[in-house]
Amino acid sequence: MITGALHLDLDRDRPVALHRQIETAIRDAIRSGRLPLGAALPSTRTLSADLGVSRGTVVEAYQQLTAEGYLSSRGGGYTYVAAGARPPRPTPRPAPPSRPRIDFGYGRADVSSFPRAAWLRSVRRVLNDAPGDRLGYLNGRGSPELRDALSGYLNRVRGTDIDPDHMVICSGFAQGVSLVLHAAAARGARRLAVEDPTSQDAVQVARALGLQVVGIPVGEDGADVAALAASDADVVVLTPSHQWPLGAVLPPESRAAVIEWAVRRGALVVEDDYDAEYRYDRAPIGAMQGLAPDHVVHAGSVSKTLAPGLRLGWLAVPHDLADAVADAKILADRGSSSIEQLALADFLERGELDRHLRRMRPVYRRRRDVLLAALRERLPDLEPTGVSAGIHLVAWLPPDLDEESVIAAARARGVGIAGLRPHRMSPAGRDALIFGYSSIGERAIAEGVALVAEAIADVRGR
Amino acid sequence: MITGALHLDLDRDRPVALHRQIETAIRDAIRSGRLPLGAALPSTRTLSADLGVSRGTVVEAYQQLTAEGYLSSRGGGYTYVAAGARPPRPTPRPAPPSRPRIDFGYGRADVSSFPRAAWLRSVRRVLNDAPGDRLGYLNGRGSPELRDALSGYLNRVRGTDIDPDHMVICSGFAQGVSLVLHAAAARGARRLAVEDPTSQDAVQVARALGLQVVGIPVGEDGADVAALAASDADVVVLTPSHQWPLGAVLPPESRAAVIEWAVRRGALVVEDDYDAEYRYDRAPIGAMQGLAPDHVVHAGSVSKTLAPGLRLGWLAVPHDLADAVADAKILADRGSSSIEQLALADFLERGELDRHLRRMRPVYRRRRDVLLAALRERLPDLEPTGVSAGIHLVAWLPPDLDEESVIAAARARGVGIAGLRPHRMSPAGRDALIFGYSSIGERAIAEGVALVAEAIADVRGR
């Protein structure tokens, strides 16, 4: 009897209409395969008598399931199953990979220090005050309030020369470089130069777009400008304020040479203005964009100052590229969240970012000092570099150690740490470890270095 | 005298260090061209004496500007300008295009009714309670809290069969379809079928990816399934619950035929589950995804239920596509805002979306009724279609009118309204107007229709 297969136990006390209960039971039976494809259902007259409900109740359930495509009817009121069972669910949710106990991960602010109360105040002001149309679709450039606030902030703090009309708000550097590369490729760019080593953000996107990618070696003084000149590139992505990951500052002569190259070739410089907010032992260096706003894209985000979870970044682009980049943003996702754009504008205008950075700089500086002291004490044959700014450092390994073995041995001791190799464009080069210190306390840093020292002893003892 | 060119008026009362004031004045003079490329600066000794400041103050300013690339020095302490002037700013910000006084725009919720207080409560709970790591980077699928809440909601309300592990949170339908098409193209898809007429979201992305795009005619019963079967497509984007823009519901037999086609060809169906929340005169129709979760992508967003400005949408994808779509999301933008994802999860779990929709349905229904009555009275020779659900309707124009003339004449009378032609894949077909009624009050609707009637009289009177 079909009502058995359906487990059609109607519960007249449930706050669910009887026709809905019938509908759900039949749908579940079809999905599970208990009612197979093609199976005939009892007539509405029979089923209503069986269940002690009105015929109209059953008719309504059958009509709904017919409308949804589960049932179909032939002439004469004969109703049958029109959809097949689903295959069983593949597997239960896999357990997430276990986290290291001490994690020297890099590339993000200390999210445990995110200024939640100040951010909530900004969101509240936006929800109280923003005109209704700000909750609709914005144009591709993003909220004018945020572009005004950001250009004011960056022109003040980073020495940029940004016109808010030439900004495009985006979801962070990864999306930003993607939008710029889309626009550059549409304008005919064929070859991208990146620093070597480099973050892979631009590389992945460029390859997906069919651009050639060439690495420019990085030395003590940042990217090798002669190699850039010889690269035949149309676009270069640089980290002049604090080379990622090695930490060098691009010297003035090199900046001038890069700009001269860009002007001569009609090439585009994308400046990833990375880590400039955290300086410890050197003077602030203005952004390159201020020298040549018509040739340099300035790109930044709040991922390393506030939290990656906000997914907010920006581009300041040469005026002849602004429309194309804004169009690319519209095509990509129709714009970033307007409430959060307005909240960040309020947050900046009230000086909350300045305040947060003033609070965090000494915290990060102390963590860096503890890390350097621990490395000196426990791992004197590692050579730290890029230590005068930022929220990570790179430590060169001595020649007898390879980074993959050290990383695996550290992992076995509960320490997460990354190596340099995944960021290299060419296979040659010294191995190194990347110690992010933004998100672990001073005690854990010292303990983590001790554990890495033990891991290195493990590797050497084999 | 150079200090004149620099307007070097130091203000000892300003809370800005003197070396900063010198630095800013020189930088501005270089940028404006008052100090040309190659110009020599006074020695630090001379300038410090001129200004009555310590020599160290001037040295610090020169060093900073040298570090930024504005100045350079040759042997003997001789300092000159190393960067050129910027060309003058192109043009002041253009005035935004004037808005129509009455706007029958479509495709968005009434943002003036956005439940600001309830949303703020959800944001506050997230900022109070969310663990710190939720503010870092999430994986490509998005917040598990939101995927759990959404799958629960959709499985209950839309009759879907969604496993939260196969969801990917995205920025709305436009990004969602882009992610799916990227993954499908990477798997070898070459040809996309879309309804004709259709929203252009998928079309633009498909063309950018190099896919062929073919239109499937839409009739009274939605998409023509026979034309789909003959289309040789690998992917089809459909709006089965409420065809966009014509409003037809895809009948059960057609749904079954589409799924059979997809299974036979190994093709992918993308279900844009559009407007299903607003029904007035018909029974709810479950989503197609519930019939065949391994062949149908279910895509939706909050743009038409809450506000486009949130930029939150979702995909429920067949299990064999989930990793590829999540990877595409990571490549595109590293994920959507985590605070807003968690806020939406809280908002759903507390029944706030149900509450908001219960509040809005009668509002939209009354606006539709006023619109239909006004059209009957003032424009009886227009034929409304797709009126039983949604937040817009299409009105066919009689053969003597072309939509572009009517749109222009309406615009001249202060009414914004769209036509059907920009959404057609093939040039043939009747002209029509699209009346969005979500975002204007009842009085403005009646007035707007009267103005469109006058505009049509203008066109006919020419």
Image: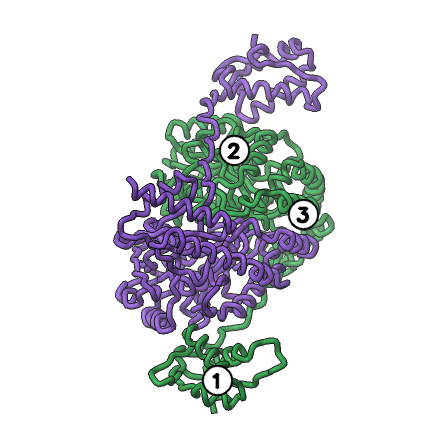
Chain colours: A green, B purple
Residue most toward the bottom? A1
Q: Please give the name of the residue rendered at 28% of the width and 39% of the height, measured from the top-left corner.
A: B462
Measured in 3D between alpha carbons, the distance from the residue under mark 2 to the one under mark 1, in whole angstroms, is 67 Å
Q: CA distance from mark 1 to mark 3?
A: 55 Å
- Vertical comparison of A424 with A92: above or below: above
- The quarter in which the N terminus of chain B is drawn is top right
Is residue A346 at all visible to an observer of this figure?
yes
- The residue shown at (35%, 73%) is B253
**Residue A457 in view of the camera:** no
Q: Amino acid at mark 2?
A: Pro
A88 shown above or below B352? below
Q: Secondary structure at mark 1?
A: helix
Which subunit holds the residue at mark 2?
Answer: A
- Dot 3 alpha-carbon crowd within 10 angstroms: few under 14, some 14 to 19, many 20 or more: some
What kind of residue is marked 1? Arg
Q: Earlier in the sequence, mark 1 or mark 3?
A: 1
Mark 2, other Cα within 10 Å: few <14 / some 14–19 / many ≥20: many
Residue on which disc 1 sits: A55
Residue A164 is tagged as 2
